[in-house]
Image (cartoon, rainbow, N blue to C red):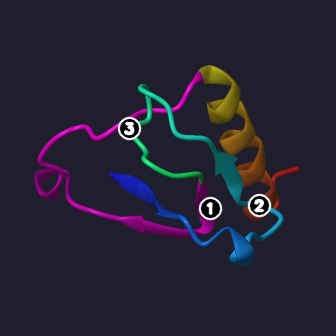
Amino acid sequence: MTVAFVSTQLKWKESTDVEIQPNNLNGLKRESLIRLSKIATLDKEMALELLGAVDKEKLEEINTNLLKIFGLV
């Protein structure tokens, strides 16, 4: 499974990071950044449970920024 780091350090925002506000769907406590330039691959066995999710609008923004990172647009 591929994961992206999440950080509350908004001052380090890069152009491909996605800002996300806390809500019931994502389970965050503070405004955060999804750091798309900081991705990692983990074994599925390491994931104990689902902690949160993003809405369709944020997922589209994430996908667009990933395409930019990988030079596909």
Q: Residue visible at 44% across and 35% down?
A: 26
Q: Are marks 1 and 2 in contact (CB under 8 Å)?
A: yes
Label 1 amino acid?
Leu
Residue 36 in magenta stretch: yes
Q: Residue visible at 83% across and 65% down?
A: 15
Residue at the far front: name it: 29
Q: Are marks 3 and 1 in contact (CB under 8 Å)?
A: no
Marks 3/2: CA–CA distance: 22 Å
- What range is drawn magenta here? 32-55
Residue wearing tag 2: 16
Choose mark 3 or mark 2, whichever is in front.
3
Q: Mark 1: which secondary structure?
A: strand
Marks 1/2: CA–CA distance: 6 Å
Residue 49 in magenta stretch: yes
Q: Is residue 27 above or below residue 3?
A: above
Residue at the far bottom: name it: 12
